[in-house]
Image (spheres, rainbow, N blue to C red):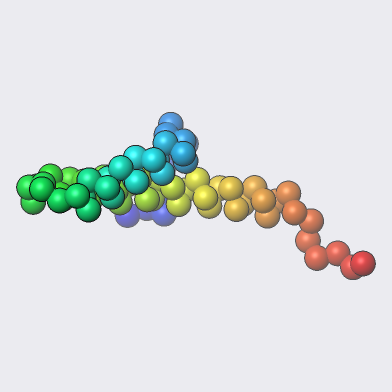
Amino acid sequence: MSDEPAEQPTTTYEQAREELADVVRRLEAGGLTLEESLGLWERGEQLAELCRHWLDRARERLAAATPGDQPE
């Protein structure tokens, strides 16, 4: 699996996080078939990767905007 999507994702961090939370709720609630559970698990993995992508980009932007160690 790649560390980052090939293109800029169209889903925002907030959308991905909310959908991931919904996936977790559905998995925790149970009552799903094995196939449904596996499908949700796979979608959760995709969403987690997307969230990591957005957080990594945010860290990069913060690092670029933060001046290095400067003497006082």
Please tell me which residue is depicted at 37% across the width and 50% down the height of the picture.
Answer: 48
Task: Note whether residue 36 is visible.
Answer: yes
| Position above or below: 38 against 6 | below
Number of marks: 0
Task: Please state the horizontal and vertical placement of residue 21, each as a whole percent of the image.
Answer: 34, 46
Task: Please state the horizontal and vertical placement of residue 54, each as a whole percent of the image.
Answer: 50, 45
Please tell me which residue is depicted at 42% across the width and 36% down the height of the picture.
Answer: 15
Judge left or right: residue 7 versus residue 30.
right
Task: Please state the horizontal and vertical placement of residue 38, each as a whole percent of the image.
Answer: 15, 50
Q: Residue furthest top?
A: 10
Using the image as rendered, state which of residue 5 and residue 32 is in the foreground: 32
Q: Residue furthest bottom?
A: 71
Q: Residue furthest right?
A: 72
Please tell me which residue is depicted at 15% across the width and 51% down the height of the picture.
Answer: 30
Task: Please state the horizontal and vertical placement of residue 41, each as a whole percent of the image.
Answer: 22, 51
Quadrant the C terminus occupies? bottom right
Judge left or right: residue 56 versus residue 23.
right
Quadrant the N terminus occupies? bottom left
Judge left or right: residue 9 versus residue 55.
left
Please tell me which residue is depicted at 22% across the width and 53% down the height of the picture.
Answer: 28
Task: Note whether residue 42 is visible.
Answer: no
| Position above or below: 63 against 10 | below
